[in-house]
Structures are given as structure tokens and as C-alpha cells.
Image (cartoon, rainbow, N blue to C red):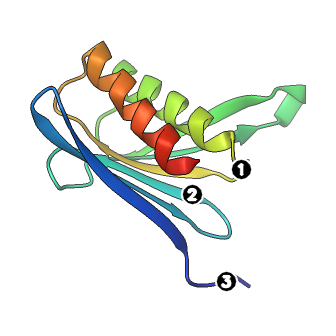
Amino acid sequence: MSSFPVTSRQGSEVIEGVKTDFHISNYSDRTLVVVTQTGKPGTFIHVQRDSSSGRNGLSINVLVGKRDDVTMVYARQIAEVMHKRSQKPVLIALCVLNDSPVVFKKVLQNLETLSA
């Protein structure tokens, strides 16, 4: 049985001139992470630990939206940040307009701060 209220944290920062909103909700069975620069959810990605065959990697599935290398890198790194606190699966809603390294670094820094 899940306990409510769900714990949530949110914040925003202007990154490279674009307001970027962050939201993390911790449910009993997974963590929801929203990163958006448009106010829309964008691509939905599900990430969980894959312990099959003795591996300790990540299973990353794009549920809806863009399926490209940048999305996969974001998903992997966001999940790693979240897995520092909990091994629960992570559902990510990602919508960034600029995939520069500066934006990527700032997104991860903001999520580190929010998840602490």
C-alpha cells in the first residue's frame, strides 16, 4: 500500500536563456522526474536496474517520443542521479530545446540539488 502524500520537490533555473523547470516525485514504486523547457512533458522514458545475467546495468525504454542518442544519455545520467538515493525505477519526462553540454551539465546539477 502506498503512502500519501507523495513527496515532491520542484525548482527552475534559466539555462542558456531558457527557463527550465524541474520536478521530482517519489512514489512508493518509482520516481517521476520531469525536466522541461516548454512546459510540456516531451519524451517519456522508463529506466530501471537490470540485474539479469549477473549484470548491473540499466534497462532504458523510450515509451513515447524521441528515440535518439541524446535522449538515451540524458535518461542514463538522470537515472544514475536518482539511483544515488533509491534503486526504484525512474519515469522521466524530458523536453529540452538545446542539447549542448552546458545545458546537460546544468540539468544534472539541478536534479542533484533537488534529489538531495
Q: In front: 90, or 64?
A: 90
Judge the density around disc 1: few (<14), some (14-19), many (≥20) Cα neighbours within 10 Å.
some
Which residue occupies the extreme right position in the image? 54
Q: CA distance from mark 1 to mark 3?
A: 16 Å
| Residue situated in front as seen by the camera: 48 or 36 | 36
Query: Which quarter of the figure is the N terminus placed in?
Result: bottom right
Distance (Cα) linking label 2 and label 3: 14 Å
Direction from residue 101 to residue 110 in the image, left or right: right
Callout 2 touching callout 3 (CB < 8 Å): no
Answer yes or no: do the residues labelled 2 and 1 have beta carbons within 8 Å? yes
Question: Dot 3 corresponds to which residue?
Answer: 3
Q: Does the image show residue 68?
A: no
Q: Is residue 107 visible?
A: yes
In primary-sequence order, the first of circles 2 and 1 is 2
Relative to residue 50, is residue 43 depicted above or below? below
Three-letter amino acid code of the residue under disc 3: Ser
Residue type at mark 2 is Thr
- Residue linked to disc 1: 86
**Helix or strand or loop: what does disc 3 sit on?**
loop
Which numbered disc flags the more N-terminal residue, 2 or 3? 3
Query: Position of 92 compared to 97: left or right?
Result: right
Give the label on residue 69, or none.
none
* Residue 68 location, quadrant: top left
Lower position in the chain sequence, tag 1 or tag 3: 3
Q: Amino acid at mark 1?
A: Ser
Residue assigned mark 2:
31
Taking the spot 82% from the left edge, 36% from the top edge, the residue there is 51
Identify the residue at image location x=37%, y=29%.
71
- In which quadrant of the rendered view does residue 79 lie? top right
Q: Nearer the viewer, residue 2 or 10?
A: 10
